[in-house]
Image (cartoon, rainbow, N blue to C red):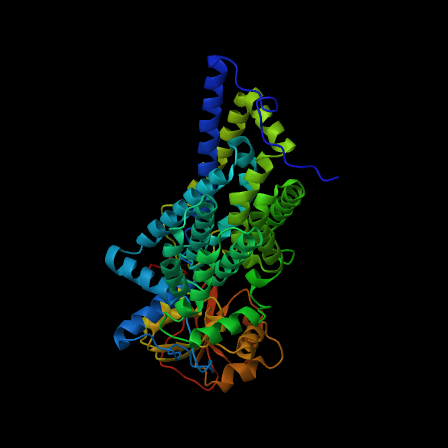
Amino acid sequence: MVQTSVEPTARTVPSAVGPRRDGGLRFARLGIIAALALLYLSRPSATTVDPDIWHQMALFRESLELGYIPAVDRFAYTPTLPQSIHHEWGAGAVAYGLVTTFGGSSILDLKYALALALAVLSVLIAKSAGSRLPVFAPLCVPAILVVGDAFSPVRAHLYSLLFFAVLLWFFERDRAGHRLWAGACLPLFVLWVNLHGGFVVGAAILALHWLDRRLQRLEHRHVLAVLLSLPAVVCLNPYGIGYFGYLWRALTMARPRIGEWRPVWDGAGGIFFAAFLVMNLVLVYAIATVRRRRTASLAIVAIMALSAAFHQKMLPFFAVAWLCYIPACVSRTRLGCRAIAVFRRFPEALFALSAIAAMIGVQAAIEAKFWRLRVPGESTSQRGREDIVYPVGAVDYLQSRHFRGYLMVPFAHGGYVSWKLHPAVKVSLDSRYEATYPDWLVEEIFRLYDAEPGWQKTASKYRTDLVLVPTRTKLAKVIPQLGWRRLFTDRELDLYARPDLRPEMDSVVGRAAEGTFP
């Protein structure tokens, strides 16, 4: 027989006795809140500029010169799709406006502002749903671990997370009998459509919210009206109805070479995978003990969990939904009541644990130098290479030699090169992927850097002038043996000219220095 939910009562959760105990509880609450805040802030303390922001800003800069947002690619010399529909063009407009007005460090300010807004909304939703602090606090930790990877400064993904939380807040207002949120929903989606393609997640959970209200015979026409208006809203973008073609391609294509699109068991770090498993075990427990009125909330969490299992990119959405709803569900169970009772009995011990957690968060943020925006030209991590190391030295070398031509680049470097060297230099590829490049070309260039059979043909058939080669790739070991001339080298990257090309540029051994933003 399934155990029904149990509301905390005076019998199951004894009230505090005496002013001393009340003081200890208040002290412990403050300690827990401070610890959670510091742990959360330690997650978005990564300050390496996101690789996508370069091509976003490059597109908007080009658009300002043209007077319109182009639907045909202007940055690559390799074959591209007939239409280049950049679903993050609005994120590029925001970033470009900020950095040209307030300087590069404003990107960090934007990131922390978005992260803070996301945290406030998540806490408000959890509180509205009925979450209790002694339950919310421990369940917050795995969610903080999982959500943190979305905080690269500034990834357009973060806008989607924030709007996702706004939509969940709208649902809470709807359950409370308020309907004004429906009027604000369409402007929200207009912004969302032009900032990031993640608005499809919002459309899906909006449909789920409508279905739940319809099945429960609650007022649902206002939700249906918003849903039926969404196709028209999607057309309010620079590409018009062409956006639908992009969406179909983006939602149905495979991305085997991109780590964040792989299943969570394929490449996710051990601690993140463990946190994901713990969160799903708690989700199963919540589903087994939930009251019917929270069925829609748990359905949202379950769908996000399933999506995250197959695509790591969805992990932050799962973390936000889980944090908003699962602590509230667990707070109503016998396990939640026991957690509240333990908190009331041992507030000092819990405060001590919170203080330790807070110190860990502070140390992590300080080690990351959360106040300093970085464009790393070489790896400084003691645990290995940086996730992103930019070709700072090679780009400075090409800029100082006034090079004009075609440059073969790895997936993550194309946007940086375009921002720094366009229009003099065109690139082979950048991280726009589904927006601009055919699948076969992406695979071809990945195979080139893996030095797989046929790589020489790939390097030459597009009239490539120079090849940017990370020293850690297999290509770096074989390209010198086949007549390619090395023009530049540092600890991280080499720059080679094709055998039949004799550019009037001297060979340089450089030092990979820190780059600048923008």
Image coordinates for residue 300, horizontal then vertical, percent: 56, 52
Decide if residue 195 is on the left or right side of residue 297.
Answer: left
**Residue at image location 50% in from the left, 52% down from the top:** 149
Quadrant of the image occupied by residue 23: top left
Decide if residue 119 is on the left or right side of residue 106.
Answer: right
* Near-viewer residue (472 or 50): 50
**Residue at image location 38% in from the left, 47% down from the top:** 112
Name the quadrant of the C terminus: bottom left
Name the quadrant of the N terminus: top right
Q: Would you say residue 190 is visible in this rendering?
A: yes
* Near-viewer residue (72 or 196): 196
Query: Above or below — where is 126 with respect to 154?
Result: above
**Total label count?**
0
Image coordinates for residue 409, horizontal then vertical, percent: 46, 72
* Near-viewer residue (439 or 174): 174
Image coordinates for residue 500, horizontal then vertical, percent: 46, 87
Decide if residue 394 is on the left or right side of residue 18.
Answer: left
